[in-house]
Amino acid sequence: TASISEEGEIFYVILQLPTNAPTPDQVHRGVDDKNVTVSKLAHAASGSIKVGGANTLVAGYVFNLQLSVLYGVFAVAIDKSGNRQLEVSFTNFTTSSEAPPSAATDASPQWLLVTAALLALGAALLSHSQ
């Protein structure tokens, strides 16, 4: 779940910690700090979440994470006018030690932690781009 202060899109990469933070451009492109496409990395994730308006919560799913691992969520937001956040927002979380259900749902332990991490970023996104 994520939220921003206006219509736009939140781009994120989720990487195992410790790692160097990617730049806003790298997060937007879905690559790590070495310009490696995150979708090609084992146990990492990237993507985007479209947000239809101010204070609108949206949800998505994240797969490919290991159990009991510390991850960092690096995110940037772009509003509908194309203004991109100038700094990467960051939060971290540790995945559950329990395997998620065979079909991922909103109740999946990994998803709940990622949801909380993205929601924590939501209030800060775009505040730096103005």
Image (cartoon, helix red, strand yellow):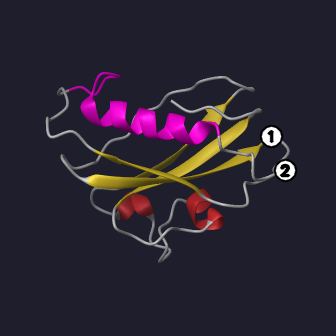
Left or right of 102, for residue 33: right
Vertical side of 18 occupied by 61: above or below: above
Residue at 56% x, 26% y is 58
Vertical side of 71 occupied by 95: above or below: above
Kindly identify the amino acid type of the residue bearing the numbered disc 1: Lys
The part of the chain drawn in magenta is: 103-123
Left or right of 79, for residue 74: left
User: In front: 109, or 63?
Assistant: 109
The question of residue 85 being in magenta is answered with no
Q: Residues within 10 Å of mark 1 (few under 14, many from 20)?
A: some
User: x and y percent of residue 106 in the render?
Assistant: 35, 22
Residue at 27% x, 48% y is 65
Q: Quadrant of residue 54?
A: top right
Kindly identify the amino acid type of the residue bearing the numbered disc 2: Gln
The question of residue 115 being in magenta is answered with yes
Q: Give the SS element for disc 2.
A: loop
Residue at 38% x, 40% y is 62
Q: Quadrant of residue 117?
A: top left
- Our reading of the magenta stretch's main secondary structure is helix
Q: Which residue is mark 2?
A: 130
Residue 80 tag number? 1
Pick whichever of labels 2 and 1 is earlier in the sequence: 1
Closest to the camera, between mark 2 and mark 1, is: 2
Residue 1 tag number? none
User: x and y percent of residue 93 in the render?
Assistant: 35, 46
